[in-house]
Amino acid sequence: MRIVTAYLIGLVFGLGISISGMANPAKVLNFFDIAGTWDPSLIFVMGGALIVTFIGYRLVLKRSGPIIEGGFQIPHSRTIDIRLIGGSALFGIGWGLSGFCPGGALPVLGTGNSSVVLFIAALLAGMLAARFMMRLAKDSRTASQAATIQIR
């Protein structure tokens, strides 16, 4: 049942991305080109997504729990830190340079288009690099705390 549900959710998502034009990097880049060939149509796509998300969260979170999972997985941190700002900036830069966001790129990956394959490869490399850097930072903090404790 979980696999069928995941498939149907992915199918609806992929169809929505394709129908809306978010899978077309030229359309996305034209949306960002305010001074040139600006295409404002994606405002309606994003606005519609925000409305559906707003209503959906209100309805779903009234339930005692999700239907298929054991509990809701909602981020509880409201901290705006360098990781959040940096990640958001990198996301925006990558989207603006390539015309793909991860959600829009996944349905297009099946076409075998070399630009989306390259984008997904860069996305995965970036995720691995970020994970590696976070692990290094954590190890560095742990070593620093251990050294501070030993000095005292």
Image: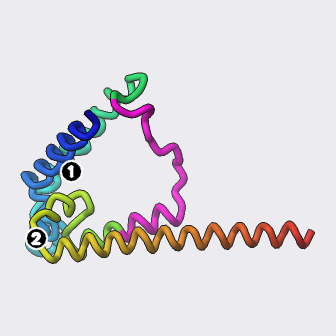
Q: Residue at x 14, y 68 (%)?
A: 25
Q: Position of residue 64 (x, y in %)?
A: 42, 22
Q: Which callout, 2 or 1, points to the residue nearer the camera?
A: 2
Horizontal placement of 29 versus 53: left or right?
Answer: left
Q: Position of residue 114 (x, y in %)?
A: 15, 77
* Distance of label 2 from label 1 (alpha carbons): 17 Å
Q: Which mark is residue 86?
A: none
Name the amino acid type tagged 1.
Answer: Met
Which range of residues does the magenta coloring cover? 68-90
Neighbor class of circle 2 (other Cα within 10 Å; few <14, some 14-19, many 20+) is some
Q: Are marks 2 and 1 in contact (CB under 8 Å)?
A: no
From the image, tell me which residue sits under label 2: 26
From the image, tell me which residue sits under label 1: 46
Mark 1: which secondary structure? helix
In the rendered view, would you say 72 is above or below 111? above
Mark 2: which secondary structure? helix
In the rendered view, would you say 47 is above or below 95? above
Give the mark nearer the N terminus: 2 vs 1: 2
Q: Position of residue 87 (x, y in %)?
A: 42, 66
